[in-house]
Image (cartoon, rainbow, N blue to C red):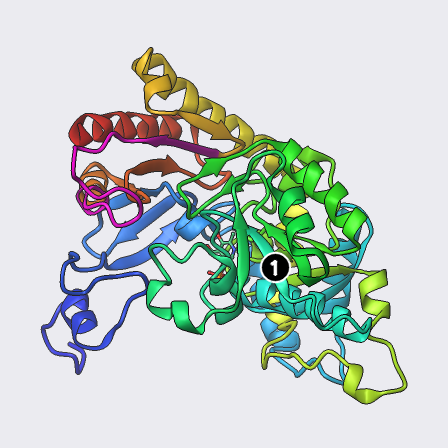
């Protein structure tokens, strides 16, 4: 027996851990996960759950992929970590070359970091410092979308819709103009802000934390054209949507739009390691070149371009291309969607059943007077009900969704669909 005595993992956890997005006074004990393989999470007591949300939208090809584990081990033996200021290494350069090759448009520079919030933060800082270099420091109001979520650091929180996550921080957040993801809104906001506008930031096609809200590609096309007219950057946050989730490698491809800055994380390493990147055009990179050292981009994290993360990301990208992950995720999404549609019939429309790539979502009706949105009580009950049925789902308030990894089998997809149907009945 260990020095921890007879206490269970959950009891030990309750004494020392502070979990993300968790109300410790209300929520059930966390699930003790012992291991994972493919689309399966194995609990300490041997029970198995289907990872219906890809471990926070990250796990892309499945847990424990051999190619990824091998890349991790090989790189750990070769070069574990080295700072990335004044040095370079093969995994970082090779990954940057590969990302530039597959990225939309002419994104040609890769700035590495280690989480999605940081990747967004870096995009904001690059966009603003570029304006400063161009002698336009008053361009400091970013436009984002209502309901948007871009991460939990201060810049990312400022962009995001404050309700409900960021209300306590409101006095500390900088000014952002949020508009609906609808035609006409972004060009109008750009015109309104005139010489104050710094750039437009959006989650392309699907707003994840907003409740898998899907909107038309024309909104992104219109944003692109309006940014061009105003001479400001279009920043796309592909942290969730990137690497095939929406059925194409990057969601903005479905709008035929190339951004000036793009944030990626989560699926970059197949969802296995904390690695992120911000891609920029050569034009933006060049505005930082100067005889003046103070015009450098003063941003860097200890683990920028972490060699093991980069090696793993290369392996994940190779799987993506070899297996056509976007097509696999599309097939998974369609199967779950069709199963739900078949059983729901007319109700599918009422519940706003929707699917894009490997993402399937619907809105559960809420009782009169009951809280809606992320904090709706329904979500905690439904999460437990899903777990009891062998599936890990994490409803966003009254929004029930699935986004499993690309290795999810047909029978697992059917199980996911069936459990969602049962939860719909429970949520009535
Ligand atoms: C669209 C989007 N941007 C940024 C983030 C933040 O990423 P991270 O949690 O890695 O900081 C998330 C996380 O869910 C996201 O969905």
- Could you tell me residue 114's position as x and y percent? 56, 69
Tell me if residue 214 can be seen.
Answer: yes
Residue occupying the point 81% across, 88% down:
293
The residue shown at (33%, 49%) is 41
Q: Closest to the observer: 394 or 129?
A: 129
Q: Residues within 10 Å of mark 1 (few under 14, many from 20)?
A: many
The part of the chain drawn in magenta is 359-381
| Residue 30 x %, y % | 22, 59
Q: Does 228 appear above or below 406?
A: below
Residue 147: in magenta span: no
Which quadrant is home to the N terminus?
bottom left
Q: Is residue 390 left or right of residue 54?
A: left
Horizontal arrangement in the rendering, residue 46 relative to residue 328 (left or right):
left
Q: Residue furthest right?
A: 291
Residue at 46% from the left image edge and 37% from the top image edge: 213
Classified by dominant secondary structure, the portion drawn in magenta counts as loop
Q: Nearer the viewer, residue 375 or 4?
A: 375
Residue under label 1, please give it: 142
In the picture, the quarter occupied by the C terminus is top left
Name the side, left or right, on which 106 lies relative to 424. Answer: right
Q: Residue 267 location, x and y as percent?
A: 55, 52
């Amino acid at each position: 027996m260990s020095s921890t005595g007879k206490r269970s993992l959950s009891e030990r956890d309750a004494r020392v851990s502070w979990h993300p997005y968790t109300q410790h006074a209300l929520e059930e004990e966390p699930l003790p996960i012992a291991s994972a393989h493919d689309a399966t999470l194995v609990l300490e007591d041997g029970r198995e759950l289907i990872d219906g949300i890809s471990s926070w939208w990250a796990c892309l090809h499945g847990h424990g992929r051999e190619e990824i584990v091998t890349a991790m081990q090989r790189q750990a033996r070769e070069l574990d970590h080295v700072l990335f200021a004044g040095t370079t290494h093969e995994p970082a350069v090779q990954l940057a070359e590969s990302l530039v090759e597959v990225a939309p448009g002419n994104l040609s520079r890769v700035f590495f970091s280690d989480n999605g919030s940081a990747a967004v933060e870096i995009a904001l800082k690059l966009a603003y410092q570029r304006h400063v270099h161009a002698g336009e420091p008053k361009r400091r109001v970013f436009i984002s979308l209502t309901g948007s979520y871009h991460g939990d650091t201060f810049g990312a929180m400022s962009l995001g819709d404050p309700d409900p996550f960021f209300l306590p921080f409101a006095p500390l957040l900088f000014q952002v103009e949020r508009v609906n993801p609808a035609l006409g809104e972004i060009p109008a906001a750009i015109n309104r802000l005139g010489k104050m506008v710094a750039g437009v930031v959006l989650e392309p096609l699907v707003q994840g934390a907003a409740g898998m809200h899907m909107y038309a590609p024309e909104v992104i096309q219109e944003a692109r054209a309006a940014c061009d007219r105003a001479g400001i950057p279009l920043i796309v946050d592909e942290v969730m949507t990137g690497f095939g989730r929406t059925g194409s490698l990057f969601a903005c491809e479905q709008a035929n739009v190339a951004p000036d800055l793009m944030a990626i994380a989560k699926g970059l390493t197949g969802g296995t390691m904390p690695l992120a990147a911000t891609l920029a055009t050569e034009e933006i990179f060049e505005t930082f070149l100067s005889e003046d050292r103070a015009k450098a981009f003063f941003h860097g994290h200890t683990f920028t371009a972490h060699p093991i993360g980069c090696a793993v990301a290369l392996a994940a990208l190779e799987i993506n291309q070899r297996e056509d992950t976007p097509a696999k995720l599309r097939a998974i999404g369609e199967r779950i969607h069709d199963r739900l549609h078949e059983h729901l019939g007319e109700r599918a429309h009422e519940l706003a059943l929707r699917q894009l790539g490997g993402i399937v979502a619907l809105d559960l009706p809420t009782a009169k007077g009951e809280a809606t949105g992320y904090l709706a009580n329904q979500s905690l009950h439904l999460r437990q009900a899903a777990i009891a049925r062998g599936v890990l789902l994490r409803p966003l308030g009254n929004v029930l969704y699935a986004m499993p990894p690309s290795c999810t089998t047909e029978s697992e997809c059917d199980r996911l669909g069936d459990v969602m149907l049962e939860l719909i009945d429970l949520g009535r």
